[in-house]
Amino acid sequence: MNITKICCIGAGYVGGPTMSVIAQKCPHITVTIVDINEARIAAWNDSDLTKLPVYEPGLAEVVAEARGRNLFFSTDVDTAIAEADMVFISVNTPTKTYGKGKGMAADLKFIELCARQIAAAATSDKIVVEKSTLPVRTAEALKSILHNTGNGVNFHILSNPEFLAEGTAVQDLHNPDRVLIGGETPEAVNALVDIYATWVPRERVLTTNLWSSELSKLTANAFLAQRVSSINAISELCERTGANVDEVSRAIGTDSRIGSKFLKASVGFGGSCFQKDILNLVYIARSYGLHEVAHYWEQVIIMNDHQKQRFADNIVQTMYNTVSGKKIAFLGWAFKKDTNDTRESAAIYVADSLLDEEANIIVYDPKVSAKQIYADLDYLCTRSPEENRRLVTVIETPYEAIQGAHAIAVLTEWDEFKGYDWKRIKDNMMKPAFVFDGRKLLANNNLSDIGFNYYAIGE
Ligand code: UDX
Ligand code: ADP
């Protein structure tokens, strides 16, 4: 099976960077990324590369190299499907907000719509690749929809989960630890292996059956999230006992059986994957009657919710049990540094909790827009949009955001925060000047010596 044309449905945080890198590395393949969101496609096509809808270090350079050569962004979904040999499905799979499995299961309505659209638009045989994270055995549903169209077209289904992390997406795509491809037809599997083998060493391209591939994605994210919740559980114990969580992380991380990565205590993990994938795992386990398995993984989420809540509670308690009318400056809103993505960011939940206590919140994030911040708060439906805009102000310069604040809360580990003039910041704040560091980012900035009341997670 010789692939010369690829279509990717979904121009988001996964589809955009992944397909841009495939196009960059495979100039002989024409890659068209389609999306129903016209504004998003217009932004991907913008001649000003700072306007790309996804902020990722190095991505603008990749797009600049391939766009217009063999990389195209379009809203014409049907044409791109009809012309392609291989169709990637990279649409969002949010947690269901209604009906059975509400708050737990993945909402597969976007995937099903895609399958039906592929079935309707296809006039020649196609390899269909699941890129979005999906519950185990979703490929079965895809197969059933595609194989029952009766238009004589053959479809081969592959699962090719994405392991890139936001903020390092381009690096992860250029040099992945592994690429995973699950499938039943060897020819179709090999066609995709050949594409990745253009730049990834063959031994790093793993092939499995469909269900192992689907389950491996959920399991990888569950294990990573579990490490964060494990170290966060220890961070609370550190705060009570006088141990320092960074020292504990370093001490255990040097054990080669444990390893040093994903042991950074924080205000809680966020992002579009960890919580969603664990909830999915829990839901699947429960649906097979595996209650102990479900209960085990659910604890990872419970610990994460606790970590966010106790960070907010600590701010209130430390500030004499009231933050009503006080100005609290948030440094960072994104769920991690080097991305403009805010999905499930701890900042949203910490803000919500402080707003319940009638705090005034001033937000500064180098990459997140005011529109996104208000949308995140409005989505919670805790208070009216007018109330959110009355209590929360978004400011584009950090020193202005901090002016006259009673406290600073560090929610995202942006490197630039470490380089600020902290003496100047203290001089412009209300006294005592509090800093609550949810990332243990400013541990080496000597804030206590400068005169701050400095509180860091796990210390
Ligand atoms: C994750 C997986 O890493 C990736 O393989 C998968 O494809 C998608 O989900 P992502 O959510 O983009 O990637 O970022 P990741 O680096 O995993 O961080 C997730 C959250 O955990 C962030 O909020 C981050 O701040 C937090 N985290 C991570 C910690 O609090 N401590 C750590 O040690 C690591
Ligand atoms: P991810 O992080 O998984 O990439 P995003 O929400 O960033 O998720 O991107 C998913 C994209 O898929 C969105 O831009 C959305 O408009 C697009 N999308 C969803 N359903 C369809 C569809 N049926 N056809 C085309 N695009 C779709």
Image: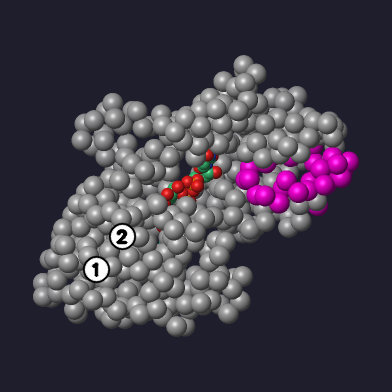
Looking at mark 1, is its residue's CB closer than 8 Å to ligand 1? no
Callout 2 crowding tier (Cα within 10 Å): few <14, some 14–19, many ≥20? some
Q: Is residue 352 above or below residue 420?
A: above
Magenta stretch? Answer: 400-428
Q: Residue at x 26, y 34 (%)?
A: 286
At numbered mark 2, what does the secondary structure look like: helix, strand or loop?
helix
Discs 2/1, front: 2
Please give the residue where the numbered disc 2 appears in the rendered image: 202
> How many numbered marks are there?
2
Q: Residue at x 20, y 35 (%)?
A: 288
Q: Amino acid at mark 2?
A: Arg
Find residue 224 and report its horizontal and vertical position in percent.
43, 40
Find residue 291 and report its horizontal and vertical position in percent.
27, 28
Find residue 300 and report its horizontal and vertical position in percent.
42, 32
At numbered mark 1, what does the secondary structure look like: helix, strand or loop?
helix
Q: Is 455 left, or right, of 123 in this rendering?
A: right
Q: Is residue 279 visible?
A: yes
Is 146 in front, or is 97? 146
